[in-house]
Image: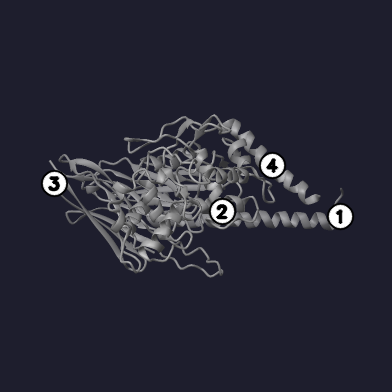
Amino acid sequence: MAKIYKTGVLLAGLLTAGMSSAALAGGPVDEKLVIDDELEIITRTAAPEGHPLDEVISGWHYRTEETRALEADSFQNPGMLYVERGEEIWNTVEGDAGKSCASCHGDGEEFLKGIGANYPKWNADANKPFNLELQVDQCREENMQAKPYKFDAADQKALVTYIKHQSIGMPVEIDLSQGEMQEWWKKGEETYYTRTGQLNLACATCHEDYNGNYIRADHLSQGNVNGFPTYRLKQSAMVSLHNRFRGCIRDTRAEFPAAFSDELMALEVYVTWRGTGLSVETPAVRQ
Amino acid sequence: MAAPKPRVKVPKKASKGEVVTLKTLISHPMESGQRKDKQGNPIPRKIINKFTCEYNGQVVFSCDMDPAVSANPYLEFTAKVEDSGTFKFTWVDDDGSAYTTEKKLAVE
Amino acid sequence: MSLTRREALGLTAGAAAFITFGGQLAHAAAAETEEAIKAFSGGAMPESGKISLEAPEIAENGNTVPVSVSVDSPMTADNYVESVLILAEGNPSPAVATFHFTAMSGEAAAKTRIRLAKTQNVIAVAKMSDGTTFMDKKEVKVTIGGCGG
């Protein structure tokens, strides 16, 4: 009993402290993201049908002026270093088949345009949704005869950053009509609304009910994933979506699922859908 | 870990006597020497400690860096250019390695 | 609740020890920073003016805090800014970076990103070619994330 009471007090403290400072600081900033003064990024848009909120808003709007400025200048954005590294990997031969990504797909900038905006997508052979990491690993094993990447290997993050970056500015849209995507969406929705951990938080608690408020000094966003992999100042490196999922769940003081597990793949499908219509921002810059 | 990768941004053209802005970035963890690994052992310091920018062989700007400079160090500064030429950028690592890159500028 | 004499003494001694310890710590950091400034300036404490330091009032993450300096100077061969020292008073070691300019720099202005361990003063000191020094200081509040993530 005492334990539950304490958790309740802690949570109430976290969120109320947030509400009082939110009254001062307000919600998302009213600014436009234009990268290098030429590429307009859709950072606010009408929510897709069935979405609990009216408008979906990119996490960019919840960051400070300095962090927002880093993303608006592709030179200053440290994430672009990983895009360049990813391009090298795309063109590097690996594995027993003596192939690189480019051996089959050609020029990455041409081939990859728009692809990242439509992931995760149904993979009939695997009978589950695939994100870019799983797609890359399948390609490596079957076509390149190379080893799959270890989760969050530096090259995996750089390559996925490069792939996703080729869709920068294009709206996120995933196809839920294929295979069993609806069922996975539903499963992801359940996870999103299920309270978990000693703090008893669901994704929805922070990112739906309290977005725009503060949790201690942190300005809560809607938790959209259109900028992943994202350059996070805290790590001073690229952070993958499943790394962030696990980190967020860990912070609720819960046990966290494995990367690319069914539970997190379902969550990826659902959360990606929640950001439908936002531009791909990869590599976004966040705190 | 891939080798540190420098990026520089220099305008292609400038007029005589113009002050141009130069931006530089290099991928580097800037390991401060104050962190510990999972076993609790200190991770040795490894940072870029010196950056130099030359134009046609003359030093324009340089910087000494300590571990308090962020990972992937970013530097922005200016140069006054009178003639066309080549900028040479050099980063020096604690282990003695130097990473360099060059960019040409046309002065009209 | 009433305190016994022993408890009261213990509390007072504890509080005194805390204050002294805290005071010494602050003093040590300040002393080290002052020493670094004097080593750079050649002994004198710099005046204010001429140099301007820009840094965010609140940094979203202490790992990457953008700072920029600019110094008012004609930047000619015989009248220019030699160098600018950046210090962070509250870091384990105050040294951050030193920018070296030449007449070819055109302007004495530079920007970088730094690590700040906690809320503290960032200090910039400019040394002119005639040996005079000038200083500016900004407090940056460093915030900690929501659930520790």
Q: Which residue was labeled with disc 4?
A: A13
Q: Which image quadrant is residue A42 in?
A: top left
Q: Chain of mark 1?
A: C
Mark 4 vs mark 3, CA separation in Å: 63 Å
Q: Which image quadrant is residue B12 in?
A: top left
Asked if the residue at tag 4 contacts the one at tag 1, i.e. Cβ–Cβ closer than 8 Å, the answer is no
Element class at badge 3: loop
**Which one is in front in this view, the residue at disc 3 or the one at disc 1?**
3
Q: Which residue was labeled with disc 3?
A: B83
Q: How many marks?
A: 4
Q: Residues within 10 Å of mark 3 (few under 14, many from 20)?
A: some
Kindly identify the residue that appears in the image at 43 percent across and 63 percent down. Answer: A148
Relative vertical location of residue A279 with respect to residue B53 in this rendering, above or below: above
Mark 4 vs mark 2, CA separation in Å: 34 Å
The circle on residue A262 is: 2
In this view, the residue in front, A111 or B48, is: A111
Q: Which residue was labeled with disc 1?
A: C4
On the image, the x and y values in percent for residue C25 come to 58, 57
In this view, the residue in front, A59 or A129, is: A129
Q: Residues within 10 Å of mark 4 (few under 14, many from 20)?
A: some
- What's the residue type where badge 3 is placed? Asp
Mark 3 vs mark 2, CA separation in Å: 62 Å
**Which one is in front in this view, the residue at disc 4 or the one at disc 3?**
4
The circle on residue A126 is: none
In this view, the residue in front, A55 or A177, is: A177
Residues marked 3 and 1, same chain: no
Residue C90 is at least partly visible in this image: no
**Which one is in front in this view, the residue at disc 1 or the one at disc 2?**
2
